[in-house]
Amino acid sequence: MGINWFRYASPASFYPLAGKTIPWFVASAVLLAIGGLYWGFFETPNVLSDQKQYYRIIFVHVPAAWMSMWLYVVMAGWSLVGLVFNTRLSFMVAAATAPTGAIFTFLALWTGAFWGKTSWGTWWDWDPRMTSELILLFLYIGYMALQSAIDDVRRADRASAVLAMVGLFTIPLIYYSVNCPDPNQCASLHQRSSMKSIESNILWAMLTMTLAFWLYSFAVILKRVRNIILEREKYTEWVNELPEIRSQQVRS
Amino acid sequence: MADAVLQAENLTCIRGDRRLFSDLSVCVRSGELLYLQGANGVGKTTLLRALCGLLYPDEGQISWNGKPIREDGEEFFDHLLYIGHQSAVKSELTPLENLRVSCALGGLYPEDGMLWLALERVGLRGFEDLPVRMLSQGQQRRVSLARLFVNNALLWVLDEPFNALDADAVVVLQEVISSHIDQSGLVVLTTHQEVMLTSAGVRHLRLG
Amino acid sequence: MADAVLQAENLTCIRGDRRLFSDLSVCVRSGELLYLQGANGVGKTTLLRALCGLLYPDEGQISWNGKPIREDGEEFFDHLLYIGHQSAVKSELTPLENLRVSCALGGLYPEDGMLWLALERVGLRGFEDLPVRMLSQGQQRRVSLARLFVNNALLWVLDEPFNALDADAVVVLQEVISSHIDQSGLVVLTTHQEVMLTSAGVRHLRLG
Amino acid sequence: MNRMWRLFRIIVLRDLLLAFRRRTEILMSLFFFVIVVSLFPLGIGVEQQILFHIAPGVVWVAALLSSMLVLERLFAADYADGTLEQMLLTSQPLSIVVMAKVCAHWLLTGLPLVLISPLVALQYRLGEGQVLPMMWSLLLGTPALSMIGAIGAALTLGLRGGGVLLSLLILPLYIPVLVYGAGAIAAAATNAPQQAYYMLLGALTVLSMALGPWATSAALKFSLE
Amino acid sequence: MNRMWRLFRIIVLRDLLLAFRRRTEILMSLFFFVIVVSLFPLGIGVEQQILFHIAPGVVWVAALLSSMLVLERLFAADYADGTLEQMLLTSQPLSIVVMAKVCAHWLLTGLPLVLISPLVALQYRLGEGQVLPMMWSLLLGTPALSMIGAIGAALTLGLRGGGVLLSLLILPLYIPVLVYGAGAIAAAATNAPQQAYYMLLGALTVLSMALGPWATSAALKFSLE
Ligand code: HEM
Ligand SMILES: Nc1ncnc2c1ncn2[C@@H]1O[C@H](COP(=O)(O)OP(=O)(O)OP(=O)(O)O)[C@@H](O)[C@H]1O
Ligand SMILES: Nc1ncnc2c1ncn2[C@@H]1O[C@H](COP(=O)(O)OP(=O)(O)OP(=O)(O)O)[C@@H](O)[C@H]1O
Ligand SMILES: [Mg+2]
Ligand SMILES: [Mg+2]
C-alpha cells in the first residue's frame, strides 16, 4: 500500500501540513537567493563587460522569466486535476499560483525593460520574447479577473480552470506565431537557444536563483492556499477548532 | 405510460452562508403531484432546480427510476419538462416560433397544426403572429406555458406557473395538470396562490 | 393631507392594431382605491402607465388636481409613487443601497434607521446586506415594495404588487395599502389575486 | 439647487458603487485600451518608423473604442430593470440624472486612460515631448466622448442590436475629437504649437456638455414611451 | 445523428431569424468593421506609404473587434430569458447547441467581412494581388475567431461588466489568428508565397473547432449552476 494521496487532498489535513512546511521553504529560499546573488554578483567574470555591469540583472531577469512560464504550466496542471478528479484543493492551489506567476511575469518585464533601457537605450521593443511575455501577463490578469468577477466559488474555480487550460493550449501557438510571424522563413531557421553559448558559471548562478525563486513560490503559494482554505471553510468545524481561529474568537 | 419514480435522498443545499435544507428526502411516483410550499426564500426554487439537475446539491443524490440523474442525463432529460421563473421566450419571435423552438429543444418536432392548437388552448388565439414583445405580461407567461399542451414528458417541474395569469388561465392550467396526473404523469410544482387540484395523488411538502 | 384628485377623461389607447379602451373616464380622490380588473392583455398595465405619464394616451386627458399632468410634471411627480412589473432594483447592490437610491429618486433622503425599519417591515431582516442577486424571486420583489414604507407620496400606482409574494407578505402589503387610504391617500392597483382590502373607499373598474 | 445637487451626487455615487461591486469593470476599459494598443504592432509588424507615425491615431482610436464599449451599458441596465422609468418620474429635471451618469462614466473610462497613456508612449517609443500632449489631449477630449456617447446610448436604448447601432451613430460624431486629439499628439512630434488643438478639443467638450444633457434626456423620454 | 442534425438546424435557423428580426444586427458588425477601418486614416493622416503598410494590421484588428462586439450577446440573451437552461435540459449533447450558435454567429459576422473586404483594399489602395489573399485569410481565420470567442462568452456569461472582461480574456487568444492573417496579406504585398499562412490559419480553425465546443459547453454548465 502506498501513501493515500487523497488524504492530503482534503483541506483539513493539508492545512496543518502546509503550515509546517512553509518556514522551511522560506528559509531555504532566502539562503539560496543570497548565495545565488552573491555568486552572480561577485564570483562571475566580467564576460559581458562591454554591456557594463548592468548585465547582472540577468540573474533576476531570466529566472523570473522561466518561473513565469513554469508557473502557468503548474496552474493549468492543477486546474486539469481539479476538473478531472473534482478535488477542491487543486482549484485552490491553481488560484493561489496565479498572483505569484503574474508577479514573476511583471518582474521579468520590468527587469528586461530596465536592462533594455541601459543597454539598448529603449524601454520596449516588439521583440518576440518580450511580446509573448507581455501576452502571458495578459493571460494571468485575465485569469485573475475572471476569478474575481465570479462570486460563486464553485463556478469561479471551474470557469477559471477552463480558461487556464485553453490558455495553455494557446501559449505555444502564441509564442510560435509572435516569434515567427513569417512561417516561410521560420521553417528553415532553427530556434537558437542561448543556453549552450552561456558561460557555465553564469548558468549555475542563474539556476541557483531559479531554485530560490521556486522555493519562494512554494512558500507564498502554500501561504495563500492556507488563507483560501480559511476563507472558504470558515463554517466548518475543524476550522473553528484551529487554535489561531479560537484565539481570535476569544479576543473579539 | 410506464411506472416512473423520481427520488431524492438526503439532499442538502447551502446557498451563500445559509443552509436552506438538509437531509431532505422526497419521492414522487407516476400519478402523483408534489406540491411544494413555503415562505419566500426558503428554497423552493433551489430544490426544483436541483431536482432537474440544473444545480448540484451540496450533499445527497437524486435518481430517476433508480439511476442517478447525473449519470443518465440523456434519458432523464427526455422525460423532463421544466418551466421556471424565467419564461425562456424570445421577445422578437412570435408565439408560434417560440413554441416551435422550445419543442425542438425538448426533442419534439410537431406539425404547425398542433402548435396552433396548443396556443389556442392557452388563450393566445389571434396573437400567434405578433412578436412576443408586444404581448402583455400574462400573455408572455402563457406562451411558455403552451409547452404543457405539446410534449411527451413524464415529469413536469413547474416553478410558480400561475404567476401573472388571470383567473381563466389558472383554471385551464389546473385542468391540464390534473389530467397529466390522471394519465400517470409526475408533477412537482410550487406556487403561492391557492390552487384547487382535483386529482387524488396530491402530496404536500412544506419547506422552512 | 390635502384633498387630491386624479382624473382621466375620455382616454383612448391603441397598441399596435388593437384599440384597448376608448372613451374611458375615471376619477380617484383622496381616501379611495381604484382596483383595476380584467383578463390578461386587456390593457391594465397600459392604463396604469398612462396615468403615471409614462405613456401618452392616443386621446384624452389626465389631470392631477385639475392640472394636466403633462404641463405640471414636477409637482405631480413629487406626489407619485409607481411600482411596476419591473422591480427597478439593481442586482449588485444590497437591499439597503437599493432602497436608498430609490428614495433619492423620489426626492427623499431618510436616515438609515428608517430604511432598516422599512426593510424589516417587508420581512427582509437579515438580508439587508446581501446583494439582491442572491435573494429569491419573492425577496427581490419585496425590496422594491419596501418603498411603500418610506415615502411621502399621495398617489400610489401599483401594477400587480402581489406577484411572487407569499401569503404573509400579501397580508402586510394589504395592511399598508389600507392604512394609506385611511390616511386619505390615493391608490390605483391591479392584481389577478383575490385580495381583501378592508378599507371603505374601494372602487372597482373592470376593463375589457 | 440643493436638491438637484444631492440627486446628482447620489447617482454618481451609485454608479461608482455599482462599478466597484462589479469589480472588474473599472479596470477593464483600461485593459481593453492597453490590449488594443498592443495588438497593432503585432498585426503591422514592428518597423520603428511606422509605429512612431501611427501612434497618435492608434491611441485615439483605442480611446474611442474603449469609451464606446462601456457606453452601451450606460442606460441599458437601468432600462432593463425599470430604474430608468423611476428616474423619469423624478420631479428633478432628467438632465441632472444624465449629467450624473455621464460624469460617472467619464470617471470610470476617461480618466484612467489619461493616467495610463504614458505607458503607450513607451510602447510606441514616442519622444518625451509627446507624453504631456498625449495626456492633455485625452484629458480635454474624453469628456466629449462620454457626452456624445450618451446621446447615442439614449437613442439606441432598448433597440435590439443596439450596441452596434450605437457605434454606427456615434463614431461619425467622434471624428472631430479623433482628428484634433490625434493632431495634437502628432504636432508635438514636430514641436509644432499644439494650443489650437487643445482649444478646439476644449470647445468640443464644452459644446457637448451644453447640448448633450438636453438631447440625451429628450432621447430617453422617447425611448421609454 | 438525425436528431442532432435537426436540433442543429433549428437553432441555426432560429438565430438567423432572430438576427433578421432585429434587422440592424446583421448589417451592424459589418458597418462597425467599415467604420473602424475608415477611422484610421483620419487619425493617422493619409500618407500613402504608411497606409499601405498598416492595412493588413488594421483590417485584422478591425475584424477581431467587430467579431468580438457581437460575441458578447452570443449567449447573453438566451441566458437572461432562461432559454439556455432549457438548452441544458436537452437530451442532445450541449456541444451541438454550441456549434449551431457559433455557426450562426459566423454567418452573421464573419462571412460579411469576407465579402466586404475588397472595399477596404480600395480605401487603402492595396494592389490587386492583395485582394484575394485578404479574402482568403479572412475566410479561413474568422471561424476560429467565432469559436474562440464563444469560449470566452460562455466563461463570462452573466458576469457584470462581462463585455469588457470578455475582451480581456479572448483578445490574447486571438493573437495567432491576427498575426498569420495579417501576415498573409502582408506577404502578398511582396509577392511572397502565402500558402504557409493559409495552412496555419486553417489549422487554427480546425483546432478550435475540435476543442472549442467541448470547452464552451463545460463553461456554460459551470455558468448556469
Ligand atoms: C531589453 C533588454 C533585454 C535584454 C538584453 C535581454 C536579454 C536576455 C538574455 C540574455 C536572456 C537569456 C537568454 C536565454 O537564456 O535564452 C534573456 C532571457 C529572457 N528574456 Fe530577456 N532581455 C531583455 C529584455 C527582456 C524583456 C523586456 C523581456 C520580457 C518582456 C524579456 C524576456 C525574456 C525571457 C522570457 C527570457 C527567457 C527566455 C528563454 O530562456 O528562452 N527580456 N533575456
Ligand atoms: N446565487 C445565490 N447565492 C447565494 N444565495 C442565494 C442565491 N440564490 C438564492 N440564494 C438564497 O437561497 C434562498 C432560497 O432561494 P430560492 O430562490 O430557492 O427561494 P424560493 O423558496 O424559491 O423563494 P420564492 O418564493 O421567493 O421564489 C434565498 O434565501 C436566497 O437568499
Ligand atoms: N409595445 C407594444 N406594441 C403593441 N402592442 C402592445 C405593446 N405592449 C402591449 N401591447 C398590447 O396591449 C395589450 C395590453 O397590454 P397590457 O400590458 O396593458 O395588458 P395587461 O392588462 O396589463 O395584461 P396582464 O394582466 O397580462 O399584465 C396587449 O394585448 C398587448 O398585445
Ligand atoms: Mg422561487
Ligand atoms: Mg399587466
Image (cartoon, coloured by chain):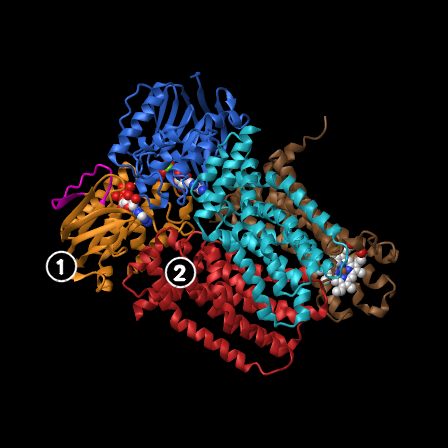
Chain colours: A brown, B blue, C orange, D red, E cyan
| Residue A12 visible at all | yes
State the extent of the magenta-drawn residues as a range.
Answer: C190-206
Reply yes or no: does residue C181 show up in magenta: no
Label 2, residues with CA under 10 Å away: few <14, some 14-19, many ≥20: many
Q: Quadrant of residue D154?
A: bottom left
Report the chain holding disc 2: D
Q: Are marks 2 and 1 in contact (CB under 8 Å)?
A: no
Report the chain holding disc 1: C
Q: Quadrant of the N terminus of chain D?
A: bottom left
Q: Which mark is residue D155?
A: 2
- Identify the residue shown where x is 73% and y is 50%: A214
Vertical position of residue E157 compared to residue C68: above or below: above
Residue A104, percent across and down? 69, 55
- Identify the residue shown where x is 13% and y is 59%: C2
**Rounded to the nearest whole Å, what is the CA distance between mark 2 and mark 1?**
40 Å
Q: Which mark is residue C2?
A: 1
Say left or right for C109 vs E121.
left
Front-most of E136 and B90?
E136
Q: Which mark is residue B114?
A: none
Front-most of E197 and D87?
E197
Respond yes or no on whether mark 1 lies under 8 Å from ligand 5.
Answer: no
Residue B105, percent across and down? 47, 33
Magenta stretch: dominant SS? loop
Say left or right for A199 vs E103.
right
Q: Quadrant of the C terminus of chain D?
A: bottom left
Reply yes or no: does residue C193 show up in magenta: yes
